[in-house]
């Protein structure tokens, strides 16, 4: 599981201080009315682990078993038998990630229960699998499938040697998978608003398939003919939609805005909010706006670590999608099904050998004649072969930078 260290927005009223495929739903559908704790746990179809079982599975929650830490608490790596789900010897059976609630943390029992309510019933290839839970005395633990590649956040922003730069094709693959997970949540089957879409909550399996995790802030979507859900403003700094922060009105288009922020992070390699950047550059969306408005300048926001791995047409399509998702008017944002279709056009087979681009295809230097060209450039070791793909339609002129 990935690290979830981002600060969350929590307020009882709108903020005024400027802070801010294979899918199915189980036979018990996600209800639109609140349920009791007993009803949620009984209908979840999850294993109810004893604390001692998880204690043995994680080698007594040893510090060297920690694979992530966040507002909820620490996440421990462990092993259970694939059939009985009882504790197994390290290195055998099914690898799990046990997220243990810190009683002094910023998240609590309500969010723990919300996670069970949704992930106990919603199943999709781009949602992380919740295997079970532990509710014993003061212990609150959630047990997931282990995601060996960790979070997208780590791969984009950590500079440790074991996090190699993601190639362009891998970035588009991850964006595509995350979009499919979000589209499923918004579908008529689920009708769920995620409310905390961010890079730290996008986990990656061994082949970089993206899966959404951490459903503690998820909400049922509007019922009947209502246009929105009125709720407290909660989420993560830099990702929440402006209309949601101003009014507390939550819609599926709030998630679409958050997706646009993550898309910018994927393209730029920069965090949504980074206080270490110079004044005027700390908020990614605000910093990027002048560049996104120009066909001559938009390429300057791109991460130099993927330089030469995409065509100008691919870059334009990706930026156009981010711009549409970040529209100030939520009615102008696409729905997630449209986002999925747009990203599908950017998918190409990934060569596990990492052989780079075809020598027969010209790739423009995105920083040519630019005052923003870096002095030192790094080539991604996760390069890909350019494969022949069907002809893609040009993005609408009204949707591309001018």
Image (tube, helix red, strand yellow):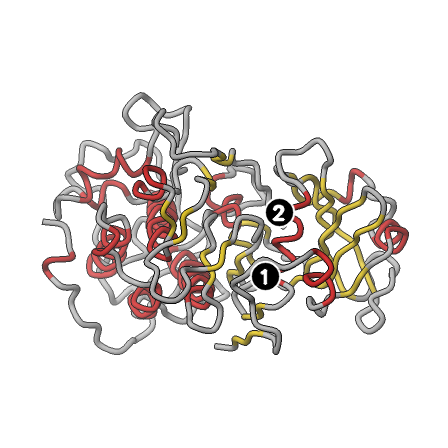
Q: Is residue 141 above or below residue 277?
A: below
> Residue at the location (88% across, 59% down)?
89
Q: Nearer the viewer, residue 53 or 308?
A: 53
Q: Residues within 10 Å of mark 1 (few under 14, many from 20)?
A: many
The residue labelled by disc 1 is: 118
Q: In the displayed orientation, state which residue is furthest to the top.
A: 279
Res 183 → quadrant = bottom left
Res 26 → quadrant = bottom right
> Residue at the location (22% across, 49% down)?
329
Q: Is residue 29 above or below residue 64?
A: below
Q: Is residue 63 above or below residue 167?
A: above
> Residue at the location (59% across, 54% down)?
149
Q: Nearer the viewer, residue 229 or 264?
A: 229
Whole-percent x and y of residue 79? 80, 59
Report helix, strand or loop for mark 1: helix
Report helix, strand or loop for mark 2: helix
Q: Residues within 10 Å of mark 2 (few under 14, many from 20)?
A: some
Residue 138 is labelled as none
Whole-percent x and y of residue 215? 56, 53
The residue labelled by disc 2 is: 111
Q: Nearer the viewer, residue 217 or 238?
A: 217
Q: Is residue 251 left or right of residue 321?
A: right
């Amino acid at each position: 599981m990935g690290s979830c260290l981002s600060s969350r927005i929590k307020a009882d009223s709108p903020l005024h201080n400027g802070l801010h495929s294979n899918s199915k739903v189980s036979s018990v559908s996600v209800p639109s009315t609140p349920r009791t704790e007993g009803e949620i746990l009984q209908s979840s179809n999850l294993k109810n682990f004893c604390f001692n079982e998880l204690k043995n599975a994680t080698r007594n929650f040893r510090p060297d078993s920690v694979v992530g830490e966040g507002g909820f608490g620490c996440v421990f790596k462990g092993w259970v038998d694939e059939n009985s789900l009882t504790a197994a010897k390290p290195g055998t059976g099914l690898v799990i990630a046990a997220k243990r609630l810190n009683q002094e943390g910023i998240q609590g029992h309500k969010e723990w229960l919300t996670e069970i309510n949704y992930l106990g019933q919603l199943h999709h290839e781009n949602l992380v699998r919740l295997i079970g839970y532990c509710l014993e005395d003061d212990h609150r633990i959630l047990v997931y499938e282990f995601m060996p590649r960790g979070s997208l956040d780590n791969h984009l922003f950590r500079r440790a040697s074991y996090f190699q730069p993601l190639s362009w094709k891998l970035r588009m693959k991850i964006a595509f998978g995350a979009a499919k997970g979000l589209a499923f949540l918004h579908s008529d089957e689920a009708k769920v608003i995620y409310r905390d879409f961010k890079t730290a909550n996008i986990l990656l399996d061994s082949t970089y398939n993206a899966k959404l995790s951490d459903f503690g802030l998820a909400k049922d979507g509007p019922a009947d003919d209502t246009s929105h859900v009125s709720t407290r403003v909660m989420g993560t700094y830099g990702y929440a939609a402006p209309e949601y922060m101003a009014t507390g009105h939550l819609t599926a288009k709030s998630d679409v805005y958050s997706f646009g922020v993550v898309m910018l992070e994927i393209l730029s390699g920069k965090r949504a909010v980074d206080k270490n950047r110079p004044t005027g550059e700390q908020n990614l969306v605000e910093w990027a706006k002048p560049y996104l408005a120009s066909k001559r300048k938009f390429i300057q926001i791109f991460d130099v670590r993927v330089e030469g791995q995409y065509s100008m047409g691919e870059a334009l399509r990706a930026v156009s999608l981010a711009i549409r998702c970040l529209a100030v008017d939520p009615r102008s944002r696409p729905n997630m099904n449209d986002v999925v279709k747009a990203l599908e056009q950017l998918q190409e087979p990934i060569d596990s050998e990492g052989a780079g681009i075809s020598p027969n295809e010209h790739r423009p230097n995105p920083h040519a004649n630019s005052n923003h060209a870096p002095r030192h450039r790094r080539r991604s070791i996760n390069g890909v072969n350019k494969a022949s793909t069907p002809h893609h339609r040009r993005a609408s002129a009204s949707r591309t930078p001018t």
